[in-house]
Image: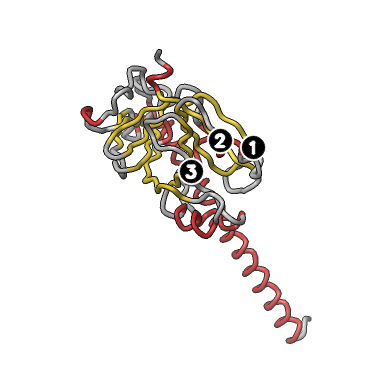
């Protein structure tokens, strides 16, 4: 029969083991929880056949950036009711109005809607990390919508993988974007419509796409890859819809 000291030792060891197990689970939830939540929400809305469209006054569309003439491609099966959609109150279109018409972004396919903070130094964590807790950062030195050059936006970056959960998850689902998908940028009350043209996965040290000068207007979105890590960077490139319709 175990002695009293052996029983106490067993209880202490078991308590510590349970504590470290719970601490590990909490850490995983804090790190990967936002990515998991966004993934589940996106897949659930796919199954429910929820379609997102942009709601914004037509007169505020920028000259040369017309209201989309191509059908938006937010979610497959749009317009075709599904059984699960009927069962869960889906099979409907939901409108997204910009969080900030002064400077904001909406990506209908993934239901992303966030404010953009201008002229953020992408090389200074002390500056950009607090911004990324609130929304999307516009890289200082890159252009603004409506002119030739590179409009560079980044979100969900961090100094270490265990800190990922502290930062805004708005770009977690960029991986779902494919060529032709719509991205709307709002700047000073004007709507600019872009379409995805390409995507790349690059090393964190590869900053050529941040510093390159383009002879045309380009939108670049950056986030960490894979979601919940800082191993790589996912870049999504888009061009004004007006340029692609020519």
Mark 3: secondary structure: loop
Q: Residue at x 46, y 22 (%)?
A: 180
Q: Quadrant of residue 97?
A: top left
- 152 lies above or below 7: above
Question: Which residue in the structure is indicated by mark 1?
Answer: 202
Q: Position of residue 17 (x, y in %)?
A: 68, 69
Q: Quadrant of residue 111?
A: top left
- Residue 235 — which label? 2
Q: Position of residue 239 (x, y in %)?
A: 45, 25
C-alpha gap between disc 2 and disc 1: 8 Å
Residue positioned most to the bottom: 4
- Residue 190 — which label? none
Mark 1: secondary structure: strand
Within 10 Å of disc 3 (Cα), the crowding (few <14, some 14-19, many 20+) is: some
- 217 lies above or below 243: below
- 178 lies above or below 205: above
* Of 75 and 171, the residue lying toward us: 171
Q: Position of residue 25 (x, y in %)?
A: 59, 59
Q: Position of residue 49 (x, y in %)?
A: 38, 29
Q: Mark 3 vs mark 1: give the one in front.
A: 3
Mark 2: secondary structure: strand
Q: Are marks 2 and 3 in contact (CB under 8 Å)?
A: no
- 20 lies above or below 90: below
Q: Are marks 2 and 1 in contact (CB under 8 Å)?
A: yes
Q: Earlier in the sequence, mark 3 or mark 1?
A: 3
Question: Which residue in the structure is indicated by mark 3?
Answer: 141
C-alpha gap between disc 3 and disc 1: 21 Å
Point out the image quarter for the N terminus: bottom right
Within 10 Å of disc 2 (Cα), the crowding (few <14, some 14-19, many 20+) is: many
Q: Residue at x 59, y 56 (%)?
A: 159
């Amino acid at each position: 029969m175990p002695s009293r000291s052996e029983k106490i030792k067993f209880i202490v060891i078991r308590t510590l083991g349970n504590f470290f197990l719970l601490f590990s689970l909490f850490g995983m939830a804090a790190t990967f929880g936002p990515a998991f939540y966004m993934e589940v929400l996106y897949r659930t809305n796919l199954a429910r056949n929820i379609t997102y469209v942009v709601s914004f006054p037509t007169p505020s569309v920028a000259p040369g950036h017309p209201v989309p003439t191509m059908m938006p491609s937010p979610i497959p099966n749009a317009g075709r009711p599904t059984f699960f959609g009927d069962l869960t109150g889906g099979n409907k279109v939901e409108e997204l109005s910009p969080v900030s018409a002064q400077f904001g972004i909406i990506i209908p396919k993934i239901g992303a809607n966030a404010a953009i903070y201008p002229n953020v130094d992408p090389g200074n964590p002390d500056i950009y990390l607090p911004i990324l807790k609130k929304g999307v950062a516009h890289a200082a030195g890159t252009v603004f919508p409506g002119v030739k050059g590179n409009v560079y936006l980044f979100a969900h970056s961090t100094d270490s993988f265990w800190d990922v959960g502290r930062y805004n998850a708005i770009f977690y689902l960029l991986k779902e974007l494919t060529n032709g998908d719509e991205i709307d940028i709002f700047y000073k009350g004007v709507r600019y419509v872009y379409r995805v043209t390409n995507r790349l996965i690059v090393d964190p040290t590869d900053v050529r796409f941040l510093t390159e000068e383009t002879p045309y207007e380009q939108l670049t979105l950056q986030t960490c890859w894979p979601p919940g890590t800082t191993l790589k960077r996912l870049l999504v490139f888009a061009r004004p819809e007006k340029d692609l319709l020519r």
